[in-house]
Image (spheres, rainbow, N blue to C red):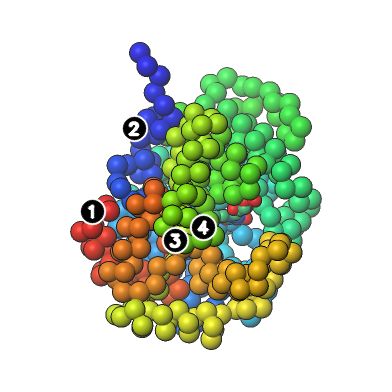
Amino acid sequence: MGARSRTDQLREASNPLFNDRKLKLGTFCSNLSGGATMASIEGILQAKWESSLALARLADEMTFEAIVPVGRWKGFGGTTNFNGEGFECFTWAAAMSALTRNCGVFATSHVPTMHPVMAAKQAATIDHIGGGRFTLNVVTGWYRPEIEMFGAPLLEHDTRYDMAVEWLEIIKRLWTSEDEFDFDGKFYQVKRAIIAPKPVQKPHPAIMSAGASPKGREFAARHADVNFINLDAHDFEAVKARVDASRKTAWEECKREIQVWTNAYIFQGDSEAEARATYEDCVFKNGDWEGVENLVNIMGLNSLSIPAPALQTLKQHFIAGWAGYPLIGTKEQVVDGLALLERAGFDGIVLSWPRYLEDMRQFKAETFPLVQQAGLR
Ligand SMILES: Cc1cc2nc3c(=O)[nH]c(=O)nc-3n(C[C@H](O)[C@H](O)[C@H](O)COP(=O)(O)O)c2cc1C
């Protein structure tokens, strides 16, 4: 009897992330003020429960495979204090799991802010609430002011991933071991650890990682079922090469199949010119340029030798939608863009819109039927 792969096991499980759809879809950052857009425009997302829930319900009605909240504890200052208000990911995911029926629900965890026993137990609870639709997004943290709120030092970059390896190992054992176990690591010591009940997903819930550095990519390849990547070039060949590299690392180095996803932002108009005008109004006229300066400084991007024009373009992408892939144009052009990403090899895309609620409603009414007609879902 041949052993079933992790992917096979997950496909048989209840998480919609492993359905057969050609292009899976999700929402990104619907739990925080601003959503993914750093601008003071009318209709920008507020950190209000009714709005966040309405977005989850729209995703649920379109049977999206993912609603992915961002783990954020502090805003970025500037004129909007981007993402400065928002809902904590695990409690958010628990409620969303109870109030939706179809969509995959994620929680994003910062390793140093949560003990693994707590994370394992909360994740198992959410997996029960949603009937096996939960995915854990593991992030190591990079925004020093928020990690220091916990009295924890922000460790050196690669050491953060060493800590995440131990953190996740304890969590996976808690999810799967019927017996109590001890763990004596460099970062964690646990004694006679156990949780019950086990999660609904067998052998355990799906794991996502957005690691991008060599160490981060290795972490994703070895431990995650889904690697989220952020694209720094948008032409087809460059995009395809990035997707192939992520999949290949997992397969060649770890003999693991993983999904590859990215984030994209949508500015849609009745004409391409109208969509571009909305984009320019949002980014150049109303963008939070002070906030984005803070963001790139904190990320250390100013100190890298990125040429000035490229850094300027990157800042525009951050303002428009967390530096996602740009989908700007008519509804047909938006669908063409999604089709291109699918052809480049992506399994899924998490989306954001500048006027999140109004724009996502329009997407559901006008654009989503075209996505289906294009055979992407
Ligand atoms: C789609 C996506 C979602 C992410 N979500 C979060 C998040 O919620 N919180 C966070 O602190 N970092 C988040 N990150 C940052 C990553 O966890 C990671 O730090 C970043 O991609 C850099 O990779 P590295 O850690 O390998 O250097 C996200 C990145 C991407 C691409």
Q: How many marks?
A: 4
Vertical order, 248 against 373 (above or below): above
Q: Give residue 19's position: percent from left, percent from top.
A: 32, 42
Residue type, mark 2 in image = Glu
Q: Which mark is residue 231?
A: 4
Residue 313, labelled with which disc? Answer: none
Which mark sits nearer the N-terminus, 4 or 1? 4
Distance between mark 2 and mark 3 Cα atoms: 35 Å
Question: Mark 4 packing: few (<14 Cα in 10 Å), some, or many (20+)?
Answer: some
- Write the residue at 36% across / 83% down: 274
Disc 3 residue type?
Asp
Q: Label for residue 235?
A: 3
The residue to which callout 2 is attached is 12
- Can you give x and y, in whole percent of width and height, for residue 18 in the image? 36, 40
Badge 3 crowding class, 10 Å Cα cut-off, few under 14, some 14 to 19, many 20 or more, is: few
Kind of residue at badge 4? Leu
Which of these two is toward me, 281 or 79? 281
Eyeballing the image, is 177 above or below 36?
A: above
Q: Residues within 10 Å of mark 2 (few under 14, many from 20)?
A: some
Q: Quadrant of residue 132?
A: top left
For ligand 1, tell me if the residue under mark 3 lies within 8 Å: no
Say which element carries label 2. helix
Q: Nearer the viewer, mark 4 or mark 1?
A: 4
**Mark pair 2, 1: CA separation:** 23 Å
- Amino acid type, callout 1: Gly
**In the image, is 270 to the left or to the right of 146?**
left
Q: Residue at x 27, y 63 (%)?
A: 368
Tell me how far mark 4 sits from mark 3, CA to CA: 10 Å
